[in-house]
Amino acid sequence: MTAAVPRTLPVGAAFDRMPFTRRHWLIGLALFTAFVIDSWELVALVYVQADLAASLGIDAATVGLVLSALSFGMIPGALLWGPVADRIGRRPACFWSMVAYSVLAIASAFAPDATVLIALRVVSGFALAGVYTITFPYFLELVPTRVRGRAAVYLSMGWPIGLLCAIGASSVIRDWSWQIMLAGAAAGGWAFVLRAVVPESPYWLVAKGRQEEARVVLRGLASPDAEATLTGSGGRIGNPLELFRGGLARIAIPALLVNFVFSWGYWGLQNWLPTLLAQQGLTLDASLAFAALSALMMIPGYLSASVLTARFGRKKVFLLYVLAACAGGFLFGTADSLTQLYLGNFTLAFFSLGAWGVWNTWNGEFYPTASRGTGAAYSVAMQLIASTAAPAAIGLLLGQASGFAVIMLVINAFLVATVLLALPLPETEGRTLT
């Protein structure tokens, strides 16, 4: 009697019939917490600018350098870590990134002056870029196809949770808050939880020819197709040039531009929100309460987007939410009362962060396995270039006495550009990853 020959199928097809299990919940929780830590660290100093300036005796320009230092270091870090994750695996890249960042960020909490702090923040950013870059593509490669979009949008909710933690800490801890918030990077110990709970991506294992290891992971994820012979998409692993060749280039180029303009629109407002609110007459405590309420509005924005993207697809929901965010930005910029100011910013927060949740999913689905980490790296690098440049550009406008409405008009222009650049991108809802 002849032994049955195992059937052959693409590794992505092994996720089509996969149930969503308790193991997926644990993986999601581990990566969600990692994203909360990312969010905390990226905004930790925004809400303690006054304490930072007073503690180190520095002016507003130097404070701006401190705020930009982490993002500046993350740009080359993202460009390195993405290809590294494509070559050595998602799991070790996330682990070593978090461990390195934890050590550097704790050291920066004891920086004696601004020069040392800026230098440590740049190097810390280089380390943090690894987990920040890989979290979403890693998660996309571990969840069933039918819930991939919804689950990844839920993962994005780590952003407002980290933001709320940072705002809360800055409100409770006053005199040496900037050092306490940086020391919170001790949560990098979460790297060991990640290594224990989150398995390596089966997509990556198949691409490296490690069939049996991929089957072990798929069995743990309860895939009914775990015993099949699995095939990958091919391609040169971790080669950035692959992004700009053939049909992939027609997707990668506008997608990278969307990452830049969308991030510019968000960070152009976020980093200067306390200052802009002060121009509207709000005190520091009122500004922090305003920011906290705005962060709370982000959560239903993510939840609504997660439901709608499963029903109507990534593209339609993303475009609709960005346009709605533009409307909120217009109302925010032209507000002549506190009520309109709140209503405009709540609308902007609800729809812009809902759109970010969809984009984090959609953007990761454009690329094949061999280039997914690299694609994520270049996407994050474009976001970080924008998040570094936007605060400086808005600061220049403020220095020229530009009004609140003019600044919001500039930010809205970048949101409109986001819509136009996203129009040619393909729908990916329900499609198997390659």
Image: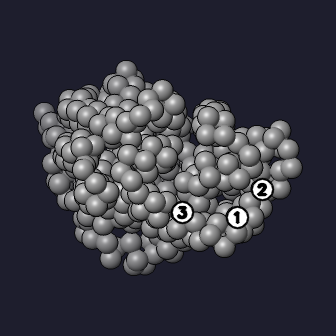
Whether pointer 3 and pointer 1 mark residues with C-beta atoms closer than 8 Å, the reply is: no
Local packing at callout 3 (Cα closer than 10 Å; few below 14, some 14-19, many 20+) is: many
Residue at the farthest right position: 336
Q: Is residue 89 above or below residue 200?
A: below
3D distance between C-alphas at marks 2 and 3: 17 Å
Question: Amino acid type of disc 1?
Answer: Ile
Q: How is the image coloured?
A: one colour
Disc number placed over residue 391 in the picture, else none: 3
**Element type at marker 2?**
helix
Q: Is residue 212 above or below residue 434?
A: above
Give residue 313's position: percent from left, percent from top: 63, 48
Question: Amino acid type of disc 2?
Answer: Gly
- In the figure, residue 195 lies in which quadrant? top left
- In the figure, residue 226 lies in which quadrant? top left
Q: Earlier in the sequence, mark 2 or mark 3?
A: 2
Disc number placed over residue 333 in the picture, else none: 2
Quick check: 351 left or right of 368? right
Task: For the C terminus, give its image quadrant.
Answer: bottom left
Task: For the N terminus, give its image quadrant.
Answer: top left
3D distance between C-alphas at marks 3 and 1: 11 Å
Give residue 407's position: percent from left, percent from top: 70, 64
Whether pointer 2 and pointer 1 mark residues with C-beta atoms closer than 8 Å, the reply is: yes
Disc number placed over residue 407 in the picture, else none: 1
In percent of the image, x 46 and y 60: which residue is there?
A: 59
In percent of the image, x 49 and y 46: which residue is there?
A: 50
Nearer-the-camera pick, 64 or 388: 64
Quick check: 98 left or right of 365? left
